[in-house]
Structure formats: C-alpha cells, structure tokens
Amino acid sequence: MGLVAVLRRRWRLHPSAMAAVIATLMLCLLVVASLRAFAGGIADASVRSSVLASTEEARLIRISTTLRPDRIAEVGKAVEQLSGRIEGRRVYAARVATSRGLAGGAAKDRIQLAESPDIAGVARLTAGAWPTLRTDAPIPIAVPEAAATALGWQLGTRAGLTDLIDDQAGPLEVEVVGVYAVSDPASPLWSLLPLALTGVAQGDFTQYGPMIVPAATLSTQTSATFAVDVPPDGLNRATAASAAGAADIAIAELKAAPAMANATVRGEMPQVLRAAAALGDRTDRVLYTPMLLLLLLGGAALALSVGQLAMLRDSETRLLRTRGASTGQLLLLAVAEALVVIGVSAAAALLLAPLVVARLAHASGFEGASASYRHTLQQSSVWGAVATGAALALVVYLVASLRHGQLRVERDASGRSKALSVLTGAGLDVALLLLGALGVVQLRRYAGKADQGTIDALTLAAPVLVIGGLCVVALRLIPLLARAGSRWAAGGDTLGRAWAGWQVARRMSTQAGSVLLVLLCLTMGSLAVSQKATVDRSMVDQSAFETGAPLRVALRGPAFGDPGMPAVLADAAGGADRAMRVYRESIDVGGLRGVSLLAADVRAGQVMTPRTDLLSGAAWSDLIQRLVPSDQKPVGVEIPEGTTELTVQTRTADQQGFGDNGLTAQLVLADAAGQWFSLPLEFTSGEQRVSLTAPAPGFRGPVRLVGLTLDGLYLGLMEESLRPRLTMSSVTAGSTSLELGTFAGEWRGATWVFAPPMPDPGSVPVLMTRDLASTTKVGVGAELKLTMVSSARTAKVVGLIDALPTATNPHLGVLADLGVVQRAAGASGDSVSGIRRLTATEYWLDPVDPAHALTALAADRARIGTIIDRNDVLAARQESSVNAGMRTAMGVLTAAALLLATLGFAAATTALATQRRQEGVVLTALGYSPRAQRRVLLVERTVVVALTAVVGIGVAALSSWLVMPLLVSGDGHAQVPPVVLAFNWPALLILVAGVSVVLVAVAALLVRGPGDLSAQLRAQEGE
C-alpha cells in the first residue's frame, strides 16, 4: 500500500480529530498573517500621526529673504525646482511689506499689506471679491474679518496708509473690495502670514492685517517667505524615509543656490520625517510581540490536538509495526501528513487573510491600499510570518507525534534515564527563568524611552521570555496547590470526592499543556484589557496636559488688553477662581532656544493641576505658593472696593502747542491678579471721568492705580524739554480722594510716565522643568538671568517639575506668576516702553458648566479666537486610526487566543477521557456508574481550570505591568506625561470568568462522550 493510500485511510478513520488539527493550525496562521498585514497599516498611520503631532514650524522648510520686485520670479523658480526632488511637496509663498500707519487712526495702529497667490485656496470670502490689479488708485485690498470689525471697515471703505519711514511721502490710498476668513487653519500658509489667524494683534503696537493686495502691487523691496511642506496624508514608512533624504539634499542645495545668496533657509523637515518613519517601524515591530505569544499559544494548542490524534491512532501504529513498518517509515508518514496539513492550512490562511484585513481596516478607519487584497499578499512580512508559523508547526507536529504516538520502540526507563530526565527538566526551568529575568531587565530599560527610536530584537523577544519564565513558575506552583487540595479531598466521605482529588494531584504534572493554554489565553486577554485601559488613561492624561485646562481660549486682537475680559471669562467659567489668564512667550535660557515661558495667574484656584508624579514629590498647592512672594510691597494706590468711576483732574504742559496731535494717554490700573490694564485719557487740562465698568464688565478687585502714561509718534524726535506732558493733580473714587503724594513724572525713553516709584520686586520666583535645570546646571534656590517680556530679570528657581503643560517642548519650560512678572516688567524702566504691560492672550478655564461656557464663548467671536476643548482633543486622540487599529488588533488576538485555547483544551479533554476508559473498569465493578465517573472527570477538568485561573490572574497582571510600555505610544504624540499602567480589574476578572466558563462548558460537552467503559473494553478484547 502506497504512502498516499495510507494517509487517506488514516484521515478517514478520525475525521473530527483531523479537522481539529487543521482548524487549530489554520486559525493560528490566519491570525498571524492578517495581523502582519494589518500591522503595516497601523505603522503607516503612526507615521502620519507623528508628522501631524510635530509643530508646523518644525515640519516645514522655510526660506526667508528680502526681495526687490524684479527678483521675485527668479527666487520663486529656484525654490520650486530645488524642492522638486521631495515627492509630493507643496510650495507656499507670501510677500509682506513694511507696516504702515493709518491716517486718522491711533498713533500705534499698524497696517500690514501682503501678496499671496495661494490664499484663495485656504481662506473664504465672507463679502466681496479677491482683489485684482488696477492701473489707477486706490489699491484694492481684501481684509480679514476680525480686522474689518475692529476698524469698522466694510466693502467700499477707503483709507490712507501713512509711510512710517518717509515723512514726505503721501498716504497710500486703499479700498476694501473683499472681506475674508480663514477656512483651513492648519494650512502652512499661515506660518508665513500668522496675523491672518487673528486679524488683529495687540502688543507695543496694534497690528491689523494682512490686507491682501493683487500680485505685483508691492513695488518696493519686501520680505518674502516661502514654505515647503509635505502633506502627511500620503506618507507611509517608505515615503517618509525617502522624503527625509530628499529634504536633506533640497535644504543643502537651497542654501548653496546663487539665487538664495541673501536668504535664510531653515527647517527640521528631515528630522521630523525620519522620526516619523522610525516610529512607524517601531509600531510595526511592536505587534510582533503579541504575534509571538499567539504562535506560542497556537503551538501548545496544536501539540495537544496532534497528541490527541496520535493517541487515537495508537492501535493503528502498533498494527503497522507488527507488519514490519520501521521507525523511519513511520516518521516519514508523519512528515508527509504534517506537510499536507500545513500546506492546506497555509493556503487557506493566505486566501482568507486579505478578507480579514479588509474587515479590520474598515473597523479601524483605514482606507486605501493597506486594506486591499493585492497589497496584503504583496507584503513580504505576511509570507514571512506564514513561513515561520509553518516551520514551527512542522516541528510541533513531529515532536507531538513522537511523544504521544508509538513511533519509537518502547523501552523501560532505567533509574539513570529518569534521573537524567529530571535534571534536564530542572535545567530547562532554570534556563527559562534566567531568560525571563533578562527579559524583565530589558523591558524595564525600554520603559523609560518607550516613545523614542526603534526596538531591537532583544526587546522584541523580551515579553515572550518574561511570560515564559512566569509560566514556568506557574507550572511548578499549580501542582503544589493541587496536592494541597487533594489532601483536603481525601478527608471526604465519598468515593467520588476522594478519587477526584487523587486524580488531580496525580495527574496535574501531566496537564502542563492544558495549564499552559489557559495561562497564555489569560495573558493575551490581560494584555488586551490592560492595553485599552492604559491607552485610555494616557490619552486622558496627555490631552489634559496638551490643553492645560478643560478649556483653553485664545483672544482676538480687540480683546487684547481689555480690562473687562477677565470678568467675561470668569462669568463663562462660573467664577473668577475658574478662569486663569496666561501670558506666553519663547525665551532663551543658557543658550537653549525655544524655551516656553508661561506667566499664569496661579492664584486662580486649581485650574492647572499637573499630574502628581510630575512634581518631584512636592504638592502643587505648595509649589504655586512659592511663586507668589508674601513680602512684596503693593504697587500704586488702592482704589476702594465697589468703585465704578474715577474722577481724574489732569493738567497739561505743552510749550510748543503740540496739542493732542498723535498723542495717546492712558491710565494704568492693576487688578487682583496683578495684571496691568490701560484706560484712555484725553490730553487736556481739567476734569475727566473714567469708568471702571463700561463698556465691559468691571475689573476683578481689589484694583490699584499704578500711574499715567503719555505716548506719541514723534515724541522720540523731540528734545525732552520741548515734549508735552500730562500729570494728575487729584484722583477721586466716589467720595474718597486717593493719595498721590508719591506720584512723580519722568521720561522713560519716549514715554512720559506719571507714577509713584516702582518698588524693585527682586528675583522673580520660577518653576523650571527638570531637563532645563539639568542642562543649565541650576538647582532649587539658584538664581539666573532670564529675558522676560523683553527685559532681563533675575529669576530664582523655587521648584522643579518634570514637564510644563502646553509648552512647545514640555521638558524645556519656565512657569512664573503673571502678577509677579508684570511687576518686574513694569519696574524695568527700559527705553522701549514707559510702563510695560503684559497682555494675557489666552485664558484657561475650568468651567462649572462646560456647555454653558462654550455657548457663551461662541457668541463672542469678535473677541474670542481659538477655543481648545479638552474633550475635543481627547476625542480626536480616541478616534485616531492608530489607537483604533491597536485596539482592534489586540481584540482579534484575544479572540484568537480564546479559540485556540478552546480547541487545545477540547483536544486534551478528549484524550484524557480516552485514557480514563480503561481505568474506569474497577470503579464500575465497585458500583461506581459511568455517569458518576464522567462527573468526576468534569470536576477534575474544572479544578484544573480554576487553579490555573487563580494563578493566571497574577501571571497576567504581572505580564501586563512588564510588557505594557512596549504596546503603547505608537500614535505619534509625545508621551507626556509618561504612560502609567492602568488595570481594569473588573474587566480582567470578567475575562477570567468568561474563559473559565467557556473551557468548563467545553469539557462538560466532551466528557459526556464515553459510554459503558467495561462494555467497550470487552468489545476491544473480542476484536
């Protein structure tokens, strides 16, 4: 009889067992192949997420220069050509003229004119049309909506723009022909025209613009800026790495090009793209870890299935031996059968894998080639995974056949061979434990840099080593627990209880396969549960860190410096202690550029509450108290609480008859947060009334009068003795006259200041991030010079934090109190400004009713700009295709693990039931019915599952704690604050209970199979 005929007869005899073997192997290979293909889609999505998570400035190549009109075409062509090697790149351009004054406007009004051929694609017209070139005056312009509102302009409005350099030049006449609003805030064009996002910017001057003019209108030398961008939508691991290399070459060629002789070329596009490609590779490799675990579980399930099949064929194998079959022939038969099974399973897996990947991709939000049939089968990693699984399956098939079948001639085991077997087993245990310890060390080393770089082979294998070591411990612990239980059962008064206890204790060491299946299944499920809980928590923590507060509100130009805005925002939030104003700027510290300085109203309750593990062991309430010195002397004169109006008696000194031409006078007041505001005064002698409540809600009290300032466009060109001045002879709050005895006038640069002496605030207390302190070699208590609000001040480090919320680089940041920094800036006395005032450009809110706050803020769009809602940021992270893909992948792995464990456990239970048929003869003779024997077998299998589940909870939890840093941080966002493992204990316990119920139910169905054991034995004897 030929080999094929023997194989066909063998398959017909045990079709169910054969089907179980094929199903086990096919399921394992199918899931492995599908996840390898699906992992590629997740990895490519992480590339795109990484690029989007970087700052816009970092991911662009930016070229800045000053151009004459006749060189614009030459430079633009050079940028287009030299950046063309970057596949898919887009080029944006803008020309900005020197700011002009506004005829008839305030002295500090500035108008920005710009040309941009790309603006129509990223902005929409709310009125009128885009300007086109005219041959006659006035020049047509398109105006930002916010600027039009602030200036009171509409279609047809004409204005004169004054030349701030040439006093003899006449005004430039312009006419509003269009009003526009930004439609694509994420466009790189706005990095060239940042003023367009707000329309108005308040600082030392009030900027309006950019007013868009037709191409070729700006006939004088202008600043020109180009931006080269690679849209993230089309990026994957391969294209990102290729674009990074091309960007390096493009930057070098742009710097060397003759047309760029006076240009500045900068950008971190190559570094951003390389980091994204590296993250994609790391994310792809991360999913090898659960795949290896699944292969391990699948191998155990396959071994049990093949073992069951070999036991069923025991009589056939003996018959073949009696007919002269050699061990080699039997081994060849096993190899042939294994190759057929593996071939069928692998073919089915490869045919079904694209369909599975498509469903997974649809569930996770992936689109395009990554989910296509062709793309799936073209991936070498898919074929490699199937080939690896097939090779392992062949080894497992042969080993299981050798161990459970009769392929070898039986020999009595000598004492020496038994001792050698024990020593070999002990040595293997020690080796696995040592490898597990190595895996633990490697994973702990990796945990500190989970979102950086790639992952090496040892780290990749570390989870398998760790889980293997833990399983060894569990496999040695469970028999001990079984023996302890058997002693308890032996004291029972029934034969069934005693026999079940004896069988569990005697047979537990032979149940390693079943125990391993349950352990690995629970571990896989625990990883999935813990991964979801950990990622969910990290997204909540990191979204809170990214926004700083539940709502972060950026103001528009008209609201800058508005003393009523704190009350408006406090009303929206439900209380002044729920609205924290923030001043932000980028400073240099110890040679480090791009350090974020946040001057915040830290006394505003607990709006900003960093996670406790970022505070170096200190309490947040203690740290913010250190930022507000208790011994600071108050500035100015306090205004009685409840005052709604000040009566100011002013007096002018104007020897040249300058009048109020171009002069701006302000009354400077400080509110409870320490921020200074200006209220307008007239340049006149006499009584003036200044409202503290109109037109906006009042100040947050107590309020103090800081002083008076007088500015003018031409004051800096005049001798001090000839300049006009304005003083206050009295200030009355209601019926109370304020004490002005210490007030005196002086010139600070070109600004007249009438105020009391500004007390020196001394060192400004600051909190510094740990990395910044380490780099600058300062510690708590140290002092250093910081340039804050354009003034060099001494700062004292009063505390360290690991990371600063909302900072550009979270590890390079400085936090100070807004009021303290304002006092320091106001007392600086530099020549740039008379009394420098901080403008809080954003507010952080912790509203009582978020819905009410959002509605109130949305209704005030003239003054409220960007609103960043923590819930929106969190929702975007949760909807990330990377995170959705990881959740889907882990869910599939858990389901596959349960199915494989069920198949393997079913095979083991069936084999065990077959073995027990002969043992049941004596019990049947003693009157113990077959039904009762099956019941005992079910109890035995239940005890195995229960003991393994109890120990498995610990193994699963410990495995999750060690392995979890490897399975997170792939969505491209900075992992700040660091990921903290989160256990969803209820879900884990439900998982354990569910797995246990399924396995026990399978056992209950299978142990019903055997009938009268003695009748079956007699039937066998008669054969």
Image (cartoon, rainbow, N blue to C red):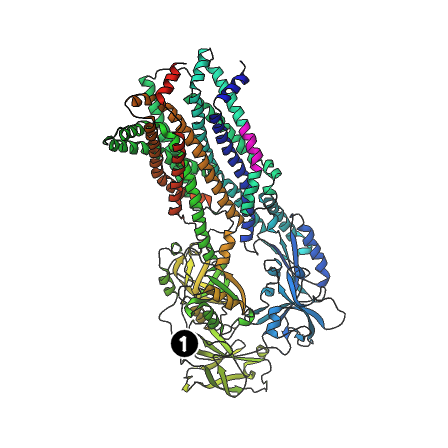
Determine which quarter of the picture holds residue 946. Answer: top left
Location of residue 23 in the rendering, given as x and y in whole percent from the top left corner: 50, 31
The reply to whether the magenta stretch includes residue 353 is yes
Q: Nearer the viewer, residue 202 or 301?
A: 301
Q: Is residue 160 above or below residue 12?
A: below
Residue 340 placement, left or right of 425? right
Q: Nearer the viewer, residue 589 or 800?
A: 800
The reply to whether the magenta stretch includes residue 270 is no
Which residue is identified by label 1? 702
Within 10 Å of disc 1 (Cα), the crowding (few <14, some 14-19, many 20+) is some
Secondary element type, mark 1: loop
Location of residue 202 in the rendering, given as x and y in whole percent from the top left corner: 55, 70
Q: Residue at coordinates 41% horizontally, 86% vertically from top-left?
A: 737
Residue type at tag 1? Pro
Location of residue 531 in the rendering, given as x and y in whole percent from the top left corner: 44, 45
Residue 790 placement, left or right of 478? right
Q: Nearer the viewer, residue 415 or 722?
A: 415
